[in-house]
Structure formats: structure tokens, C-alpha cells
Image (cartoon, rainbow, N blue to C red):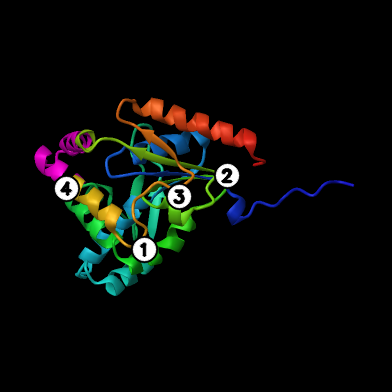
Amino acid sequence: MKQRSTPITHHTVPVVTIDGPSGSGKGTIGQLLAKQLGWHFLDSGAMYRIAGLAATLKGVDLSQDASVAEVARAMRVQFVPAGPGEPVRVVLDGHDVGDELRTEEGGRRASLVAALPGVREALLEKQRAFRQAPGLVADGRDMGTTVFPDAILKIYLTASAELRAERRYKQLKEKGFDANLPRLLDEIRERDQRDAERTASPLKPAPDASILDSSPLSISEVVDRIAALLQTRRADCSW
């Protein structure tokens, strides 16, 4: 008798989560890993930046949980693959908003709305909808703890605050934005504290996460290490 194959369902699609503080490199590394695997990619941090931008464009006070959550539920978001070496295009309601999101103000808005329980709940199903075959790489702050607790591999990527500030400074300068390194360092430290102390999905490693410090490593070295960990998990699992 022919054995029936197991159907692929939403919950059997493998997920790799990469969580960590701002500037740890998880977005770049997540995109490269997803491309290497041929999987989908979710930048959950961009979701909160988008929610903050969408609410601001509609004149909504970012401290009003219910109002921002309403905007978050209604917004249409797409991550569109770009050319080699280029970041994924972020599209909000049909408009490319990538450059508007990657500013200091975009990060400030994201941190504010990410602390709102209603907004996090509104974005939860939107994030989970990115889980599609053949697999998903998701980066953020609570991907492994809240959004995809059944992920096949969970990475907590970190780096010193000083190094993260320097990376952010270089990124902004390369894009032509004004940036102040001491102010960026202060903002990163404040954001780390705010993200760690919030009541809704605080920033912390999942109990079963592999903690990886990217400070002494190149981007390619980090991707290789995560890929090696995933290969080990593949050997131990039936997917």
C-alpha cells in the first residue's frame, strides 16, 4: 500500500527566528539567510516602523493604543525582493516607504508603538501570515518567544551597544542622512532598556535560543554559523 505523504500545513512550515536588540545585524543576516535557503523573509521590526509611520501619516497620536492598533490592522504591507546587494523593498498600501522607515525618527516611532499591547496583538496575525512554504526566516524582538514559539531554530543575536551605534551611524551616513554618534548610542541604550522592560513581549532570548554575539564576526561568518546550526537541526528532525 502506498504511504500517504504528510500534507504541508501552516504549522508544518519550518521557521528560523532571529531576535535581538536594535543594530545587532539581524535584518541583514536574516535577508541573506533567507536568500541562501530560498525561503520567505519577515522583518518584523519594519512592521512596527510601518505602523508608526502609517499612524503618523493619519495624524494619530502614537500613545493611543486603540487608535494605532486600528491603523495597524488596516494597513497592507509587502516585502518585495530587490536586486543583488539591495535591501528588500518595503511597500505600505502600494507605496515604497523603505527610506522613510530607516531614519532615527522611524526607529523612535517603532519603539513607541511596539510597547502598546493592542498594536502587538493587531500585528500578530499579520506576522504569522508570512509563514509560507518552503520556509520562513523571521527577525525581530519576540519572534522566538511570542510569534513563532515552535520555530525549528531560534537565534538571539547581540552585539555591544557601542558597535551597534557605529553600525547605525555608518548606515545613515551612507544614505545621506544626518547622524550624531553619541546621540545614537544614547538612543540605542534607551531603546534597549525600553524594549527589555515593556510588559508586552519584552526583549529577551527564548529559553531554547542559541545566543550569538556578532561583535567579533563578519556578516558572512554569522550567516554561516546559523546555517550550520540549521543543518544540525535538520539532521535531528523529520522535516
Q: Which mark is residue 144?
A: 3
x and y percentages locating residue 32 in the rendered image: 41, 34
Q: Are marks 1 and 3 in contact (CB under 8 Å)?
A: no
- Mark earlier in primary sequence (2, 4): 2
Looking at the image, which residue is at 30% across and 44% down? 21
Q: Are marks 2 and 1 in contact (CB under 8 Å)?
A: no
Q: Amino acid at mark 3?
A: Gly
Q: Is residue 70 above or below residue 98?
A: below
- Mark earlier in primary sequence (3, 2): 2
Specify the farthest residue to the front: 207
Q: Main secondary structure of the magenta part?
A: helix
Q: Are marks 3 and 4 in contact (CB under 8 Å)?
A: no
Res 180 seen here: no
Q: Secondary structure at mark 4?
A: helix
Q: Secondary structure at mark 3?
A: helix
- Residue occupied by mark 4: 187
- Mark earlier in primary sequence (2, 1): 1
- Residue occupied by mark 2: 134
Q: Which mark is residue 120?
A: 1
Q: CA distance from mark 1 to mark 4?
A: 22 Å
- Mark earlier in primary sequence (3, 4): 3
Q: Amino acid at mark 4?
A: Glu
Q: CA distance from mark 3 to mark 4?
A: 25 Å
Q: CA distance from mark 3 to mark 2?
A: 19 Å
- Mark earlier in primary sequence (1, 3): 1
Closer to the observer: label 2 or label 1?
Answer: 1
Q: Nearer the viewer, residue 231 or 159?
A: 159
- Mark earlier in primary sequence (1, 4): 1
Looking at the image, which residue is at 23% across and 60% down? 112
x and y percentages locating residue 54 in the rendered image: 27, 63
Q: Secondary structure at mark 2?
A: loop
Question: Image quarter for residue 30?
Answer: top left
